[in-house]
Image (cartoon, rainbow, N blue to C red):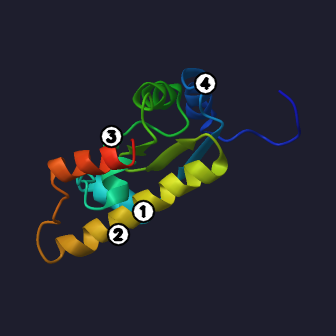
Amino acid sequence: MEGILKPSMEWYFHTAIYRKRADINAVLHTHSPYTTGLAISGVKLRPITLEAATMLADVPILPFRYPGTEELGVQVGEAILGKRAVILQNHGVIAVGFDLFEALTTIEILEEISIMTFVASQFGPPKEIPPDQIELIKRLYRI
């Protein structure tokens, strides 16, 4: 190892992601309160906005693993394949990107969708964008 600073205790999942995803140059890990809170309650994020429907179509909630362990690293490394983010049950969020801006944008969109989901659920089930409209949006934007 180089440098004088101690690596994050979560280095297992950081290195697992970089090993599995050659397209990734940035990994962010946050303890986003709304996203994590919804996951703790078993609420999966649904396609309620254009961003949720197109960018974050399927963000898995991973079962709890003790932080800083190789077991968590392996779990995250497998789950992140083909995804922009994963949610760690009772822990937080991991987002990846080509650069820090892309990873941070994913974190922000996740938290915004989580806040909208929480607010909307106080008044009834959140209304989702219909699947046929999602397909139309994807074709229009070539996603």
Q: Residue at x 34, y 63 (%)?
A: 114
Q: Residue at x 41, y 57 (%)?
A: 110
* Disc 2 and disc 1 in contact, CB within 8 angstroms: yes
Name the mark on residue 111: 1
Q: As shown in the figure, which amino acid type bears the numbered disc 3? A: Pro
Q: Nearer the viewer, residue 36 or 99?
A: 99
Q: Nearer the viewer, residue 56 or 31?
A: 56
The residue pinned by badge 4 equals: 22
User: Quick one: quadrant of the C terminus?
Assistant: top left
Name the mark on residue 115: 2
Q: Residue at x 20, y 53 (%)?
A: 133
Residue 23 seen in render: yes
Question: Residue 47: x percent and y percent?
Answer: 25, 54
Local secondary structure at mark 4: loop
Residue 83 occupies quadrant: top left
Local secondary structure at mark 3: loop
2 lies left or right of 73: right
Q: As shown in the figure, which amino acid type bears the numbered disc 1? A: Glu
Near mark 3 (Cα within 10 A), the count class, few <14, some 14-19 or many ≥20, is some
Question: Residue 45: x percent and y percent?
Answer: 28, 53
The mark that comes first in sequence, 3 or 1, is 3
The mark that comes first in sequence, 3 or 2, is 3
C-alpha separation, residue under disc 3 versus residue under disc 2: 18 Å
Name the mark on residue 60: 3
* Disc 3 and disc 1 in contact, CB within 8 angstroms: no
The mark that comes first in sequence, 4 or 2, is 4
* Residue extending furthest toward the left: 124
Q: Is residue 32 above or below residue 5?
A: below
C-alpha separation, residue under disc 4 versus residue under disc 2: 32 Å
Q: Nearer the viewer, mark 3 or mark 4?
A: 4
Name the mark on residue 20: none
C-alpha separation, residue under disc 3 versus residue under disc 1: 15 Å
